[in-house]
Amino acid sequence: MASPQIFTPREMIEKLVAFDTTSRLSNLALIEFVESYLASHGVSSLRVMNEDGTKANLFATLGDEAAPGGIVLSGHTDVVPVEGQDWSSDPFSIVEKDGKLFGRGTSDMKSFIAVALAHVPAFLKGGPKVPVHLALSYDEEVGCLGVRPMIESIVRTMPRPRVVIVGEPSSMKVVNAHKGIQSYNTKVTGLEFHSSQTHLGVSAIQYAAELISFLMTLAAEMRERGDASGRFSPPYTTINVGTIRGGTALNIIAKSCSFLWEYRSLPDADPSEIITRFNAYAEEEVLPRMRAVFPGARIETAARAQSPGLAALDGDPGETLVMKLAQCNSAEAVSYNTEAGLFQLADIPTVVCGPGDIAQAHKPDEFIELSQIAECETFMGRLAGFVSGRPI
C-alpha cells in the first residue's frame, strides 16, 4: 500500500484553489484528488453524481459510519466566475502578500475544506470514538443545488449526526441563524408597434416597470415590519432587482422585457408571501390591462433558486459543542445564505463556522488572512481531540 499523502493546510489550500471549479464547469478533477488523498489514508468515499455525470458531491466517514452522533464538516467545492474582474494575479494560483493568501475560493470556501482535509491524519489517530463525516458539494453558488441529493442520502443511509458544521466564511464565529433566499426571472411579453401609436401597442418595459415598482412597495413594507429578533443586518427581509433587459429601439414599443429579482427573508418569515403577492398583482392588476389591448400578452415568472433560512435552536447540544470548539460565548446571525438551512430542513442540527470574511467573497483579489487559517487549524485540532475522547 502506498504511503499516506500528507499535506499542510497551506499546501492543501494551494491544491484545491488550483482546480478551476467555477460553477459552470465540472468539479470532478478536484473530487478525484480528494478521493485519492482519502484512499491513501484508508478512507473510502461515496460520490453522489448530478444527472449528466459531470459533477459530484463527495461523502466520506472517518471512523465508524454506523455510529450515531457524528460530526459533519460540510463545504461546497464550486466558486464564482472571475471573468470581468480585475485580478492582480492568477486567480487559481495562490499568492501570499501582507499576511494574506490571494486566490479564488480562499475565503469562499476552499480554505475550510483544505484545513479539514489536512487534519484527516489527526482525526484518524488512535481511532476516532466519534465519527467525522466529510461532505463536499457542488453548485452551491447557483442555488445550493448539489447538496440536496447528498442530504437525502445522509438521511436515508446513516445515523443522525450530532451537528453539521458548514464552513462558510464567518471569521470563525459561530452562526446559528441566516436569511433564506428566493430568486426569480420574470418575463413580460407585450406587442410591438411604432412608438407614435402607443395606444395600439403594449410596452413590455412599461409593465415590467410597474411590476418592479410593486416589488419596491413590498420592500418598503418589509423594512417597516423589521426583525423581531434584532439580530440581522439589515434588520428586515430584503428585495432586490438585479438585472433588466428589454426593448429593441427608441422608436419601437417594446415587445419583451425580463428582469431577475430576489428576496432574502428572515428565517421566521413565510418564504412564499412575497412571490404569492407578486403573482397575484401581476395576474389581477397588470395582465388584464395588457390583454385589453393585446390578448396574447403574458407575464411569466420562473423560480431560479430557492434555499431556506437557518433558524436558531436555543440550547441545541450540537451548537453548544461547536461553541466550545470555537471558544465563542455567543452565536451570531448573518444575512447571507448557505447550505445550512437545507441540513436543518432535514432535521439535522446545523451551524455555520469557517475561516475568512464574507466581505471578501466573490470579489477580485479574494483573500483570506493567515491568522484565520491558523484559527481554523486550532479549531480542527480541538475537534480531533474531542473525537478521540479528550475533553475540550
Image (cartoon, rainbow, N blue to C red):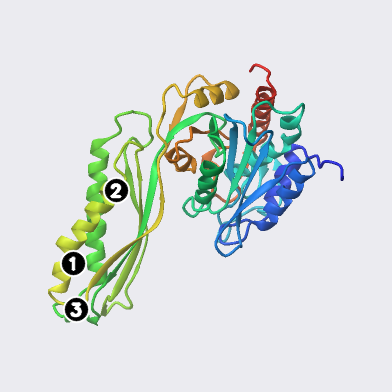
**Residue for point 66% across, 39% down:** 61
Q: Element under label 3?
A: loop
The CA distance from mark 2 to mark 3 is 33 Å
Q: Dot 1 corresponds to which residue?
A: 287
Up-down relation of residue 185 to residue 195 (above or below) = above
Badge 1 crowding class, 10 Å Cα cut-off, few under 14, some 14 to 19, many 20 or more, is some
Q: Is residue 37 left or right of residue 229?
A: right
User: Disc 2 on helix, strand or loop?
Assistant: loop
Where does residue 355 sit, x and y in percent of width and height?
60, 35
Residue 245 image point, x, y percent: 36, 68
Residue furthest bottom as drawn: 194
N-terminal-most mark, 1 or 3: 3
Residue corresponding to mark 3: 201
Q: Secondary structure at mark 1?
A: helix
Going by the numbered disc 2, the residue's amino acid type is: Ser
In the image: residue 97, left or right of residue 24? right
- Specify the amino acid type for callout 1: Leu
User: What distance separates the C-alpha of mark 1 from that of mark 3?
Assistant: 14 Å
Q: Residue at x 24, y 48 (%)?
A: 218
Residue 154: x percent and y percent?
Answer: 55, 43
**Quadrant in which the N terminus is drawn:** top right
**Height in image: 341 above or below 294?**
above
The nearer-to-camera label among 2 and 3 is 2
Q: Residues within 10 Å of mark 2 (few under 14, many from 20)?
A: few
Q: Earlier in the sequence, mark 2 or mark 3?
A: 3
Considering only order in the chain, which callout, 2 or 1, is on the residue closer to the N terminus?
A: 2
Identify residue type, mark 3.
Gly
**In-image side of 386 versus 324 (left or right):** right
Image disc number at residue 272: 2
Q: Measured along the vertical axis of the image, is residue 34 above or below residue 302?
A: above
Image quadrant assignment for residue 334: top left
In-front residue for pair 351/153: 153
